[in-house]
Image (spheres, rainbow, N blue to C red):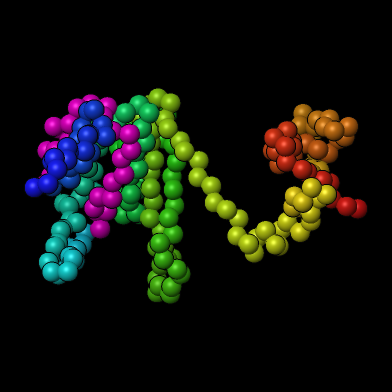
């Protein structure tokens, strides 16, 4: 062998080895982890769908299967409760927890998580539309899954996500260019229903510059955005 043996990459975390994938019952593995050691948890557990699932995995087409059957909804909740208690224990105060479920038990899951994490730690219910509309004979379409989001109880980490506007959106909405070459759009900043307690003077104007949208527009202006009133 030429040269020296490379050292193994150092652990990204001082609390747990994040380079390891644990296989087996997650409850047993969770109990081995120290408290408050994880920043982000996402789980996609059984949905209490009362069905059996199987899939052919990888290039070898290995058959893998699991049962999503429980004696009752209460039995399902108790099955998940012990695991969620452990997940709450290992979550850092700055962390976030995402529970992926659907309409089979989402309302029961929400009550359970309120008890474990605390109602005040509930952050969001995310609705994910996973399929398009179709024709069902005797019921409304079930088109979405639900993600219930909780925080660890402290100043949780939140990283805002941004995307560039599409070229079509910019061409359609930002149709004007100022003398400095910056593009902008015209908009109406007056309120259709002004109220005295939400009326402010801004840039010499007083009166109908009063909605939340207007206040948001003010903040953009302070930040240096060029905002122009609608032409009349």
Q: Position of residue 22 (x, y in %)?
A: 15, 44
Q: Is residue 228 magenta?
A: no
Query: Horizontal placement of 139 versus 79: left or right?
Result: right
Is 162 or 53 nearer to us in this picture? 162
Query: Horizontal placement of 220 versus 229: left or right?
Result: left
Q: Position of residue 160 (x, y in %)?
A: 50, 41
Residue lying furthest left: 1
Relative to residue 174, is residue 92 depicted above or below? above
Is 33 or 51 nearer to us in this picture? 33
Q: Which residues are magenta?
A: 24-49
Relative to residue 101, is residue 37 depicted above or below? above
Is 205 or 135 nearer to us in this picture? 205
Q: Quadrant of residue 215?
A: top right
The answer to whether one can see residue 27 in this image is no
Q: Quadrant of residue 15?
A: top left
The answer to whether one can see residue 93 in this image is yes
User: Measuring 33% from the left and 49% from the top, which residue is drawn there?
Assistant: 100
Q: Is residue 37 magenta?
A: yes
Q: Position of residue 168 (x, y in %)?
A: 64, 64
Residue lying furthest front: 2
- Mark count: 0
User: Measuring 70% from the left and 38% from the top, which residue is drawn there?
Assistant: 220
User: Measuring 41% from the left and 66% from the top, which residue is drawn there?
Assistant: 131
Q: Position of residue 144 (x, y in %)?
A: 41, 58
Is 182 or 227 nearer to us in this picture? 182
Query: Horizontal placement of 85 versus 194: left or right?
Result: left
């Amino acid at each position: 062998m030429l040269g020296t043996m490379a050292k193994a990459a150092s652990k990204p975390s001082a609390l747990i080895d994040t380079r390891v994938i644990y296989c087996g019952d997650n409850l047993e593995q969770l109990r081995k982890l120290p408290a408050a050691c994880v920043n982000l948890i996402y789980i996609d557990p059984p949905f209490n769908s009362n069905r059996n699932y199987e899939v052919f995995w990888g290039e070898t087409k290995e058959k893998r299967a699991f049962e999503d059957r429980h004696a009752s909804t209460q039995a399902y909740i108790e099955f998940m409760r012990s695991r969620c208690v452990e997940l709450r224990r290992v979550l850092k105060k700055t962390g976030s927890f995402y529970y992926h479920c659907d309409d089979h038990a989402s309302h029961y899951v929400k009550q359970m998580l309120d008890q474990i994490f605390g109602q005040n730690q509930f952050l969001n219910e995310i609705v994910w539309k996973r399929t398009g509309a179709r024709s069902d004979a005797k019921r409304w379409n079930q088109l979405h899954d639900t993600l219930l989001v909780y925080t660890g109880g402290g100043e949780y980490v939140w990283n805002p996500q941004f995307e560039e506007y599409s070229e079509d959106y910019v061409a359609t909405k930002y149709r004007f260019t100022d003398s400095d070459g910056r593009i902008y759009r015209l908009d109406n900043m007056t309120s259709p229903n002004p109220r005295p307690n939400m009326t402010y003077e801004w840039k010499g104007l007083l009166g109908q510059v009063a909605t939340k949208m207007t206040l948001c527009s003010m903040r953009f202006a302070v930040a240096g955005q060029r905002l122009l009133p609608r032409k009349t």
